[in-house]
Every structure is written in structure tokens, then in C-alpha cells.
Amino acid sequence: MLFTIHCLDGDDGAERRTEQMAAHSARLRTASPKPLVYGPLLSDDGERGIGSLFIVDVPDRAAALEWIDADPFRTGGVWQEVRVHRFRQSANAPVQLPVETD
């Protein structure tokens, strides 16, 4: 099942983000399962990170929460708010994510 994980930084997120970046990046290279899509959320001017967005293919919501809770940005206090939602890609989307079917 696909889940989106939408994370917003806290007030001191920029400082904490800098401190945790190497560990966060290393985890994304080795995480299991690997996220299908991920990247930073940016301020309107594109100058600073304000959060992160992931799409992961995991068995259930509990697995999505377990996956994100292990991230150094989560354990290091970068993200103030984390929202997890089940997601179904449209068959009409111009790009299709590679997901396992039941």
C-alpha cells in the first residue's frame, strides 16, 4: 500500500536539519523499504527547507509510522509535525510509481 508522509519542521528546524542531514541522507540510501519518492519541502522563495515529503510502499499505516519514526530528522527533532495518509495513485497519472500489487 502506498502512504504519503508529510513532515513540517519546527521553529528550530533549520539548525537541527543541518545537524542531522548526514545521518538522514545515509538512512535514505539504506532504508528498507526504499521510498518511491522523497524530497524537501521548500519555502515559497525556494531558499530554505521547511519539511519533507515521502511516498512509501509498506503493508500498512503502522509500518509507515515505524518507517518514519526511525528517521534521524524525526528522532533529532527536526520535524514538528508528521502526517501519514494512505494514497492511491490515479491510473490516469502521467507517471506511474512502481508498486507491488496484491
Image (cartoon, rainbow, N blue to C red):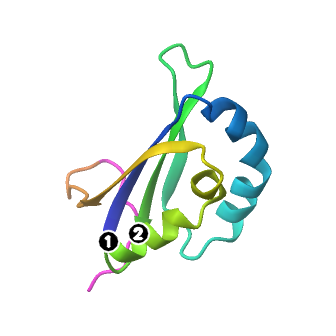
> Would you name the residue on which mark 1 appears?
61
Which x, y percent locates residue 86?
A: 26, 62
- Report crowding for label 1: few under 14, some 14 to 19, many 20 or more residues within 10 A (C-alpha): some
Which x, y percent locates residue 16?
A: 69, 39
Query: Which residue is farthest bottom?
Result: 102
Figure check: 89 above or below 44: below
- Using residue 16 as the reference point, say whether residue 99 is left or right of it: left
Figure check: 56 above or below 20: below
Queried whether the magenta region covers residue 96, the answer comes back as yes
Q: Nearer the viewer, residue 40 or 98?
A: 40
Q: Nearer the viewer, residue 101 or 10?
A: 10
**Which residue: 26% across, 59% down?**
87
Which x, y percent locates residue 94?
A: 31, 47
Say which amino acid is labelled 2: Ala
> Would you name the residue on which mark 2 appears?
64
- Using residue 4 as the reference point, say whether residue 51 is left or right of it: right
Say which amino acid is labelled 1: Arg
Query: Which residue is farthest top?
Result: 45
**Which residue: 52% across, 64% down?**
69
Figure check: 3 above or below 95: below
Q: Which residues are magenta?
A: 94-102
